[in-house]
Image (cartoon, rainbow, N blue to C red):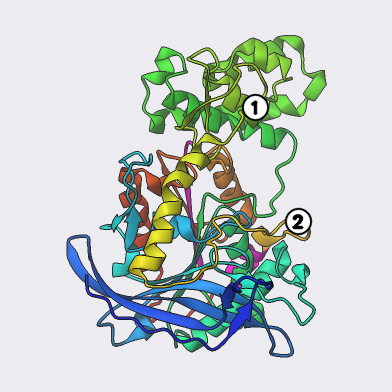
Amino acid sequence: MKKFSFLIFFGLIPLLTGFAQKVEIPMDTMVTTQHSVNIKGKSINYTAETGTMPLWNEDREPIASLFYTYYTRDGIKNKENRPLVISFNGGPGSASVWMHIAYTGPRVLKIDDEGFPVQPYGIKDNPHSILDVADIVFVNPVNTGYSRAIPDADGKVDREKFFGVQADIQYLAEWINTFVTRKNRWLSPKYLIGESYGTTRVSGLALELQNSQWMYLNGVILVSPTEIGLDREGPVEIANRLPYFAAAAWYHDALPSELQQKDLDELLPEVEEYAINELLPALIKGGFMEEARKQEVAEKMSYYSGIDKKVILQNNLEVPFRYFWKELLRDEGGFTVGRLDSRYRGLDAKEAGDNPDYNVELTSWLHSFTPAINYYIREELDFKTDLKYNMFGPVHPWDRSGNNTGENLRQAMAQNKNLDVLIQSGYFDGATTYFNAKYSMWQLDPSGKMKDRLSFKGYRSGHMMYLRSEDLEKANDDLRKFIENTLPGEEAARY
């Protein structure tokens, strides 16, 4: 692969001082390299631009430097018809590494077909990337990846400007404006994609970009979405757990034989119907539920979850997620199951206890992602720095007040008839469950007048559904279709 690069430094800001050599924050930089990838059987030439771009305060002073990677397909003369996808991961405090080198980007990390790490570590072409139909920029918020806040003259950082629901949305909207302006993408159809907490971020950004930057979108993609500020406390939250319990138990062959024999596509609608029509009304009665009814509900919950009826009754029908991850396989080798992806099994020091010792899936992912991204950025994208690449950065405490991002997204859709939403979830995700994602979709627009602009896709893996080879292809195909179906036509945007 032949590469050409150039590096422009407009400013270097000291990060550390002392007798040792200073580590610098690259504030305004750019490196470009040329590449080619085969996508859907067709060779695609593309340019990768990696660099940092400043964020300024009201006095036009730099207060942060954000690291990004921007992929553009070569040979496109008319960018006004070329979609731009702006990609964020979550945390909060997570770098953009996950979707960058495992989902939509032109290169993906080397893992087995189910997503587990293999050595030697590395990177390979992604034959399913959406780069054939859209350009992509992967953005790292402050303190993630190589992005950093810039200390003031006194060496201090105003954390309130970055580390909270509203602050995060506001400064990223400003940065996106600068990026779109510099890259001359104002005429392009634009899409936001966010994963996990990134769904909170992009849901808020949809309205912030419209109302503060006057930038209108064609689509928002929510991958493994959070609650996005929509209420689901009490009985609703408890009932919503059961379909995920059933999916995880089915994967580990922990359900009764008659349920195990059913395909997941047949089983889950059955459990969903029970959760909505029978479990939820029963839970509303709380401690005043008739004893016979309580026994009946516990029996059915046990049937669908793989958890012993006695345990369910001991928890007053409210089995905590962490207890489920510890309990499901307790008598089957003493394994725990993963939080973000319950296909993964772990080993604790003791079989006893109420929750797992560690997040088995996350340790597995860091196992393969960390070497791959550090190698890829330096050796293939030719971006060199002595800063540490923060897979997870110091962003806490995070101000979670004022989270109305679901309502923000609804309002953005109402104001912009061209804005559609796609939700993607893995059935075995126990952190942001697929059924809660469906619930969010149902509750996002209470009027139901925009439901034809909301769609859901489920996959047979976890939080990062694209780690499973089959779902990498399916999920990217779903993205590709969503983008193609929401491109602007000649019809005016009006009700």
Q: Amino acid at mark 2?
A: Pro
The region drawn magenta spans 408-428
Location of mark 1 (residue): 355
Q: Which mark is residue 138?
A: none
417 in the magenta segment: yes
The quadrant of the rendering that contains the C terminus is bottom right
Q: Is residue 287 above or below residue 441?
A: above
Location of mark 2 (residue): 397
Helix, strand or loop at label 2? It is loop
Would residue 72 be found to the left or right of residue 61 on screen?
A: left
Residue depicted at 77% across the width and 14% down the height: 290
Residue 124 point in image, percent of width and height: 28, 56
| Res. 431 image quadrant | top right
Residue depicted at 52% across the width and 42% down the height: 362
- On the question of residue 232 being in view, the answer is yes
Q: Amino acid at mark 1?
A: Asn
Helix, strand or loop at label 1? It is loop
Residue 315 point in image, percent of width and height: 72, 20
Mark 1 and mark 2 lie on one chain; the one further toward the N terminus is 1
How packed mark 1 is, by other alpha carbons closer than 10 Å (few <14, some 14-19, many 20 or more), is some
Nearer to me, 343 or 214: 343
Residue 273 point in image, percent of width and height: 54, 31
Q: Is residue 201 above or below residue 348?
A: below
| Res. 73 image quadrant | bottom left
Would residue 195 be found to the left or right of residue 381 on screen?
A: right
181 in the magenta segment: no
Residue depicted at 69% across the width and 72% down the height: 18
Would residue 204 be found to the left or right of residue 396 on screen?
A: left
C-alpha span from label 1 to label 2: 24 Å
